[in-house]
Amino acid sequence: MALLVTFLWSTSFIIIKWGLNEIPPLTYAGLRYVLAFLVLLPFALNKKRIAEIKSIDQSNWIKLAALGFLFYTFTQGAQFVGLSLLPAVTVSLLLNFTPIIVAVMAIFLLSEKPTRLQWIGAVLFIAGVLIYFYPVDLPPGRVLGIAVMTIGLIANAGSAVLGRGINRTGKFDPITVTLISMGIGSIVILAAGITFQGLPYISFTNILLLIWLAVINTAFAFTIWNLTLRHLTAMESSIINGTMLIQIAILAWIFIGESITLNEGIGMIIALSGAVIVQIRRKN
């Protein structure tokens, strides 16, 4: 299920690139996640869900709000802005350094210590990423984009650890976690987008793409992702999320016509091997 989610998110890179030609990044991100929130809202209008929401104490409200800011306002906002300033492959490269940051944070915050084999898998994964993009050729004048994605990278790692901490207890239904965190984070980013970038005219094609992003790639995918976090450690989920590197390359080859070189192919195989090694302990 986690791999299905990452595939949907990989297609988002291409769809977002198309939409950014017409819609400013922050407004685009805000519209996507507010629409997704509205899609999920009817699922909260039942006695069981309402009772669960009412039972949330102040401490957990703070955690859910923090998850909303980290995962939606900062991580997703940075990704949209980053894609407007940098090539998709550069954004993907920067995001794929998340696992190492997550691993270190999870040790101290979640007491989840990766095994030696998992560390080897993580290092192997990062090595594959570096080989895939070697030599890294960042276009000049993209310092702002890199700075934005650095913020997104840190927020992404923080949200992975916090999301794991919330979901591993099994106290709240994944829909509840997704609904509350997405509602808080999306409203903030949409308000910022409309305030600073405005609300432009959106063509019918981009409206359809926006609906797809909101319903399938967001409302559905993020709920399933929160469900998987009940069973996967923060590091494991982050590594699986990192396989988007391979998926994005394949999708770009199919839909954009970007060929995969021998160097890139070797890097993808090494990265995929690292992702598999990280999962060995869980299978045993």
Image (spheres, helix red, strand yellow):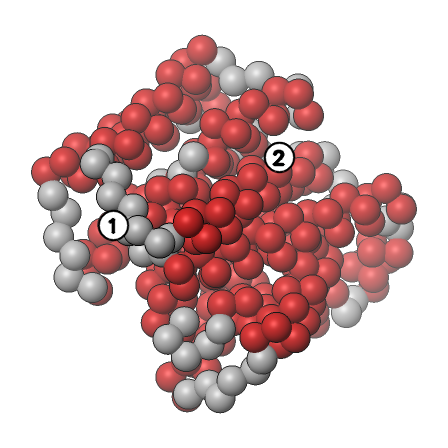
* Residue 42 higher or lower than 265, as above or below: below
> In which quadrant of the rendered view does residue 262 lie?
top left
Residue at x 65% of width, y 75% of height: 195
Residue at x 68% of width, y 53% of height: 68
Amino acid type, callout 2: Val
Disc 1 crowd rating (10 Å Cα; few below 14, some 14-19, many 20+) is: many
> In which quadrant of the rendered view does residue 242 lie?
top left
Question: N-terminal of the two: label 1 or label 2?
Answer: 2
Where does the image place residue 197, in percent across and percent down from the top left? 56, 75
What numbered label is drawn on residue 63?
A: none
Residue at x 25% of width, y 57% of height: 251
The answer to whether residue 279 is left or right of residue 226 is: left
Q: Quadrant of the C terminus?
A: top left
Amino acid type, callout 1: Ala
Q: Which residue is mark 1?
A: 249
244 vs 231, nearest the viewer: 244
Where does the image place residue 70, in percent across and percent down from the top left? 64, 48
Q: Which residue is mark 2?
A: 161
Can residue 175 be seen here? The reply is no
* Residue 47 higher or lower than 38, as above or below: above
Where does the image place residue 4, in percent across and percent down from the top left? 41, 50
Disc 2 crowd rating (10 Å Cα; few below 14, some 14-19, many 20+) is: many
Assign a secondary structure to mark 1.
helix
Q: CA distance from mark 1 to mark 2?
A: 27 Å
* Residue 7 higher or lower than 189, as above or below: above
118 vs 16, nearest the viewer: 16
